[in-house]
Image: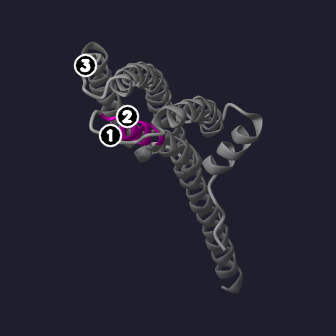
Amino acid sequence: MGRPRNRRRGRLTNVNWTAIAAFTAAGLSLVNVAVSARLAGRGRLEQWRRDEERPIVARMLTLSADALDKWQAAGYARHEWIDSLNADPSRSSEDVMARDEASERWWAGSELYDKLRFEGAQLDLIAGHPLRDAATTLVREHESVRHRIRPASGASDWFELLTEHNNKIVRLHEDLIKKTRADLGVDRASVRHRLRLLLPRSRT
């Protein structure tokens, strides 16, 4: 009677090990599915971010360049107008056309500046910190130019400052492009960094 019992126990033991192996395999399969889904989700999110970021930066560069042309035109017109005032304080020979042109160019630049701010706000929602900082610096520089050459401005040194602002904006364009390439992972180091972000982090 003892031997049959041992056989039954052996069969039960074999069945238990088989069940455990089956459950383990199923568990590993579920983990693989979960990890794959997580990586795929991160990959799609990263691709969406890149697809959105590229045109935003391109619009910012275009708007900034167009606004810079308006600021320069407004500055030169304002310079001509002020020269006419200094030449004849009685304003009998005031260059009214230059005054009006300066105002029109300023308003045109202000409209472009408002669009630039909107694009910068969009970028602030999806870009990394270095790129967001570069975009914010560019927008603030345009705000400074806009304030200096506004029609009611009484600044006396605005023309030299306008030249400095313009040169700085050109450099900021280069910095924005550089930070965008890094944020998109165009550089090799950035690619490796992005890959590390896509991998699941180990829990301790």
Q: Residue at coordinates 48% horizontally, 41% vertically from top-left?
A: 141
Q: Which residue is mark 2?
A: 149
Marks 2/1: CA distance? 6 Å
Marks 2/3: CA distance? 13 Å
Residue 30, percent across and down? 53, 53
Q: Residue at coordinates 37% horizontally, 36% vertically from top-left?
A: 146
Residue 165, percent across and down? 53, 35
Q: Which residue is mark 3?
A: 100
Q: Amino acid at mark 2?
A: Ile
Quarter the C terminus occupies = bottom right
Q: Amino acid at mark 1?
A: Ser
Residue 127, percent across and down? 50, 43
Residue 173, picture quadrant: top right
Which of 61 and 53 lies nearest the eye of the viewer? Answer: 61
Considering the numbered disc 1 on the image, is that residue within a helix, a strand or a loop? loop
Residue 37: in sight, yes or no?
no
> What segment carries the magenta color?
141-150
Residue 117, picture quadrant: top left
